[in-house]
Image: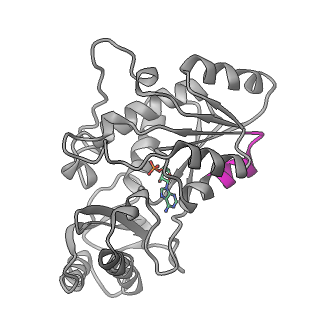
Amino acid sequence: METISLAHAIHQAVFSARCAGQSIGFVPTMGALHEGHLSLVRRARAENDLCVASVFVNPTQFAPGEDFEAYPRDLSADQAQLAAEGVDVLFAPPPEELYPPGPALQVDLPELGSILEGQTRPNFFGGVALVVTKLLNLVQPTRLYLGQKDFQQTVVVRQLIRQLLLPVELVVCPTTREADGLAMSSRNAYLSAEERRQAPALYEALMEVHEHRDEWNVRIAEQHVRHRLASFPAIELDYFSIRAADDLRPLANIRPKEQPVALIAAWVGSTRLIDNLPLATFPPTL
Ligand code: AMP
């Protein structure tokens, strides 16, 4: 596996593959890799001639006071895991490669960027959209692999691809979970033993809503989740919401034709975790 840190070099490295008509699968990450990331890499590896991954902790998607400095970074461990999965090229740039000096540029997502995650983290999706656009411009992949774990991110990036007419196919991969149901996340490393013990309650609450999706409306589901999580002292619910999968509009009822998705965010101690579960499918699709 070749590791590249310069923007012009990654562009060149994939250029010859593209000219030779090879397909390119791309998996962007912020590193601190776990099985969830690796499941995306395996799929990209299996479905494309060339597999490219990136590791970049993107400063513009963190607000002041969030965990940008503390975010776990271990490039050599990430490199070893990606090489073992057969990744061809790793792009791991320093911040100045993706953010050259000059007047700032922002991406504004007035609708999708201000709801759910965007309500607590106003800079977040603008930063995500900006860095994903930069990375897609450099790599120009055939397929982009994202995890369903970050559901709103997949909706934002789908819109970005559609509105900016980006020639790439988006592939959304299922959420990889620990044996007790907790969605894998680099931030799980922040949890204390007691917080880790309570954290699967988020997934359990989602599964209960899935189980009762034919009897409950959204209000009842919300009440249930609120009540259920109140018995976990380490957990403070930020939001629970049931939205339509395509544009995240709020729903009042759980009807399969609207492709409802249950989305949850909570503080577990001082760590903010998110999870989600589509409700239209049976059995539940992670
Ligand atoms: P991150 O490094 O957190 O930015 O994540 C990089 C990519 O991996 C994103 O597309 C995430 O949605 C995806 N990802 C993170 N955790 C998981 C998981 N548990 N299962 C599947 N995909 C994941």
Question: Quick check: 85 left or right of 131?
Answer: right
Residue at x 53%, y 53% (from the top left corner): 33
Indicate the quadrant where residue 274 lies: bottom left
| Residue 235: x %, y % from top left | 23, 74
Q: Please state which of residues 253 and 6 is positioned toward the viewer in this rendering.
A: 6
Check if residue 95 falls in the magenta segment: no
**Above or below, 208 relative to 156:** below
Give x and y (percent) for residue 35.
57, 62
Q: Is residue 254 left or right of residue 20?
A: left
From the top left corner, tell me how far across and down residue 255 is, in percent: 38, 73
Q: Quadrant of residue 231?
A: bottom left
Identify the magenta region: 41-50
- Residue shown at 19% from the left, 40% from the top: 64
Image: 159 above or below 230: above
- Left or right, 67 with reference to 179: left
Residue 240 to residue 118: above or below: below
Question: 103 or 198, which is in the foreground?
Answer: 198
Residue 47 seen in the figure: yes
